[in-house]
Image: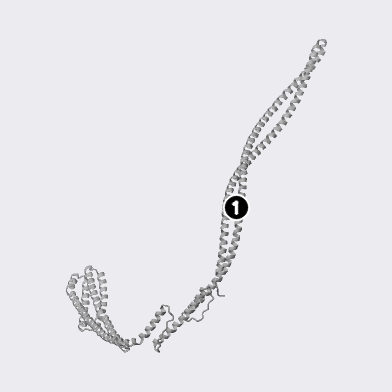
Amino acid sequence: MSNIIIFMMIFSFIAFLLIVNNLTTFYRVQYQTTKNQMEIRRDIQTINKRILWAVISNDDTVTKIQRENVEERFVKIEGYINLICTNLKNTDILNTLPDAFQNFKVDTATLFDLIERSEIQEAITYFDSTFNDTSEILADALDLSGAEADSDAKTKLINNIIIQIVAELILLTISISAFVFSRRMGKNLASSIINPLNEMEYATKQLALGNLHVTIDYTSGDELGAVADSLRESISSLSLYIKDIDTAMATMADGDFNVQFQHEFVGDFKNIETSLSDFTAKISDSMKQIRHVGAEVLEGSSQIAASSQLIAEGATDQAAAVEELSATVNDVTDRIFMNAQAAVEISKEVTDVTEGIVNGNEKMKEVLIAMETINETSEKIKTIIDTINNIASQTNLLSLNASIEAARAGEAGKGFAIVANEVSNLASQCAEAAKTTSEYIEATLHAVEDGKTVANLTAVNLESVVGNANTIAIKIAEVANASNEQADAMKQLDSGIEQISQVVQTNAAAAQQASASSEELTNEAKSMTDLIGQFHIKN
């Protein structure tokens, strides 16, 4: 059987090489020949267009450019023709195609010469006759090379088809022979392995169903016997592993995580042993941490409960104190409001007193003016008294002269002497009265001066009192305004204390609720500690 397969591989390789060789030849010869032929045709058409463009433009510069381009294309065409001749190796083509191309080059050069000499009509005539015939000959030569390439391509294709058919027939024959031979060998093998395979298939199905107590009776020294032995060993190992795992899981289900395996796990089962060991170790560590956390939670919840109770009691006391404070603030607010009203009334009264003092000050100024008038009048009276004194002195002097004259007159002047005596008495009395009046006026002037001084001092004091009264009025007004502002502030304070009272009451309720929650948390922590105590963990 192996010889047949080797023969098929060698034959297939040879056939493949032949086909690849034909395809490579086709690409290098026929395909490249056809491709070069088409390139030559395209270049010839381009050359014709450039010649016509030079004829139409009749410009030396354009003609020079077109001629240079055509000469470059001639170099390419020569390379294509050489490759075609090399690939085909046909005598007719080797003689015809290069000669036709050389004639085409000569005729093209002739046309450009005519154009450069501006012989346009001769160039057109040459293009229609000689150049056109040369182009047709070159085209026929290219057709001949194309036909030769097509003929070679068809030959290569036929050869490939023949090689393919022969290879397919030979491979089909070999495959049929191999199938018949392998079928006969298969029957012999089936008769020797189908029974142990059925037995092992049954055992594997039972394993798939979870039955680890299945037995395999087949024994042999061949590969199937080794497979049976390995399967029996695998079933035994699986049974031991499952038993250890079942025992460990039952122990953990009872709350005991301090488990130990009786057998050593190997292979991929080692990961199971490691995972279970890590699991029990991590569970034990977690239980220890939970137990520690439970104890701390229990202790903390107890402390929180006590603190919450204290907070609740303190909040209740605070609420009562805030209520008392609120009542006190209300009383103070009322008193401040009353003081503000009293200050306003006092401010009005002070304003009235100030107005009275101002009026008294105005009256005092009038008294000063009257005293000044009295002083001036007294001065005038003093002048009059001086005049009276002068008159009395003159009268007394006249009386003395009259007495002297009466004495001279003797008895006849007695009556006149009496009159003179009386006039002298009157002058003395008048002088005395003037003196007394003058003394009274002096006393009056002194009294007026003293009154004026007192009035001036009183006026100054009244001015000071008016200023002080105005200052007091301003200050009392400020006190009244401040009292009103204090009253407003106390109202806001009262409102703030009311809000504080509400917050304190809310805090008291929250503290009581927190105390209840803490007691519940304490009970839950005790329950968690009791539950964790039921587990037996690794040390």
Position in image of residue 411 (x %, y %) = 82, 10
In the image shown, does 244 or 50 lie closer to the viewer?
Answer: 244
Q: Which residue is mark 1?
A: 319
Quadrant, the C terminus:
bottom right
Q: Residue at left 61%, top 56%?
A: 313
Q: Nearer the viewer, residue 228 or 150?
A: 228
Q: Residue 371, image x and y in percent? A: 69, 29
Instruction: Indicate whether 157 appears above or below 486.
Output: below
Q: Is residue 28 above or below residue 289?
A: below
Q: Nearer the viewer, residue 340 or 88?
A: 340
Q: Which residue is found at the position 36% from the left and 85% from the top?
A: 195
Q: Nearer the viewer, residue 70 or 141?
A: 141
Q: Residues within 10 Å of mark 1 (few under 14, many from 20)?
A: many
Is residue 48 something one can see in this rendering? yes
Answer with the quarter of the image where residue 512 lies: bottom right
Relative to residue 313, is residue 192 drawn left or right? left
Q: Is residue 339 left or right of residue 198?
A: right
Residue 521, image x and y in percent? 56, 63
Which of the 4 image quadrants contains residue 315?
A: bottom right
